Image: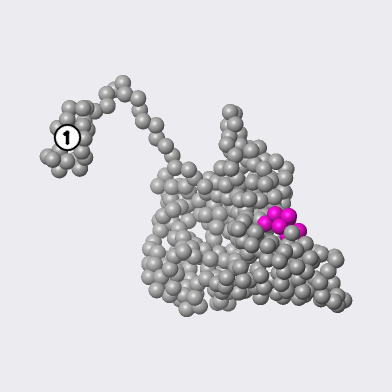
Amino acid sequence: MEAFLKTGKLGPKAVGDDRGTKKAGAGAAPQKRTTAPVPWVEKYRPRSVDDVAHQHEVVAVLKKSLSGHDLPNLLFYGPPGTGKTSTILAAARDLFGADLYRSRILELNASDERGIAVVRQKVKTFAQTTASGKRPDGRPCPPFKIVILDEADSMTRDAQSALRRTMEKEGRSTKFCLICNYVSRIIEPLTSRCAKFRFKPLDRSVLTERLGSIAEKEKLQVEPAAMEALLETSEGDLRKAITTLQSCTQLNPRDDDGFAQVTGEGVLEISGVVPDRWLDALMSACRSNSFEKVQMFVDNFICEGFAMTQLFSQLHNRIVREDALSDKQKSVICETLAVNENRLLDGANEYLQIMDLVTIMMGALNGPEIA
């Protein structure tokens, strides 16, 4: 009991036991430290502006600004996964150095509370602090800080209005970088005070090059079908493609040489894409004009656990490209898809929505054709 009160442990290794008080001697084998796994998105994030992929106009302007240590307020907008956050973090690293840049930036994303109170307190307090013009190693450093507001389009209009005043007063000591997907949701007084840069979806060649480089470093054998599936499912989103590639490595064990196989079926399974055979079966069941076959298809599809929104998206692309359907049939089915997807977003039952969809499709495909 006395040993437990002193150490909080029971057993032979508690205080008072000779075996528990012995320390490791000089000849004891050192314990191997295990490092926590790092997501590949962070592991291969660009460390310099030169490493940013594909966004040549943005990189060229930033390089000129960095060379003169004169950075304007920035507004990055574009689709997700195109390098907006990575670009400003790489620019901050080039400006302040690897040791200092974390203390010179304030990064807030959509998961943080960013109402008017946060802008008036946290952002304003950070902006009012002074910054020295030298690094710890004595090299010159820009005498300003950077506030990064990720997903700025989700901020309230009151918070954006308060931010405008802070940008005016603290413009010399603090630079702001707003990152968003939809620039139309940013109020005009903010956009007029920032240099706007649009980030384009990444080309297939850029995605192929980056994914191939990561696969080589991680010892992955990526099949051509798997690479094509990664390009199709990512839709220009490099972050999504890298995350899917990392997830696929868990499906197949590595061989004796340490290589892992990545297959096209594995990529489709990880990304949640509905296989084409299910779309063919859906069209066949609707054309049969048999409610029993349609209901059997829906029951089997629900048991597979696919996402209904993914089915609706793929089915929409299938219907639009279907040459055998008239414009009237396409319009009826696509309108139904839009209504059902909106109901799903409002929390409706998935089974009822897909049943509503397939019954309307059955009537549109088997009714009198209207050109």
Instruction: Mark yes or no: residue 11 visible.
Output: yes
Which x, y percent locates residue 130? Answer: 39, 61
- Residue range in magenta is 274-280
Question: Residue placed at 72% from the left, 64% from the top?
Answer: 293
Instruction: Mark yes or no: residue 58 visible.
Output: no
| Residue 278 is covered by the magenta coloring | yes
According to the image, label 1 marks what residue?
A: 15
The foreground one among 181 and 318 is: 318
Q: Secondary structure at mark 1?
A: loop
| Residue 123 is covered by the magenta coloring | no
Amino acid carrying mark 1 in the image: Val
Q: Quadrant of residue 184?
A: bottom right
Quarter of the picture containing the C terminus is bottom right
The foreground one among 168 and 7 is: 7
Q: Is residue 46 above or below residue 13?
A: below
Question: Residue placed at 73% from the left, 43% from the top?
Answer: 224
The coloring applied to the image is one colour
Which x, y percent locates residue 219? Answer: 60, 36
Direction right: furthest residue: 371
What secondary structure do most residues of the magenta stretch adopt?
helix
Direction left: furthest residue: 2
Instruction: Name the side, left or right, on which 135 lies relative to 365.
Output: left
Question: Residue placed at 85% from the left, 76% from the top?
Answer: 368
Direction top: furthest residue: 27
Q: Quadrant of residue 180?
A: bottom right
Question: Residue placed at 45% from the left, 58% from the top?
Answer: 105
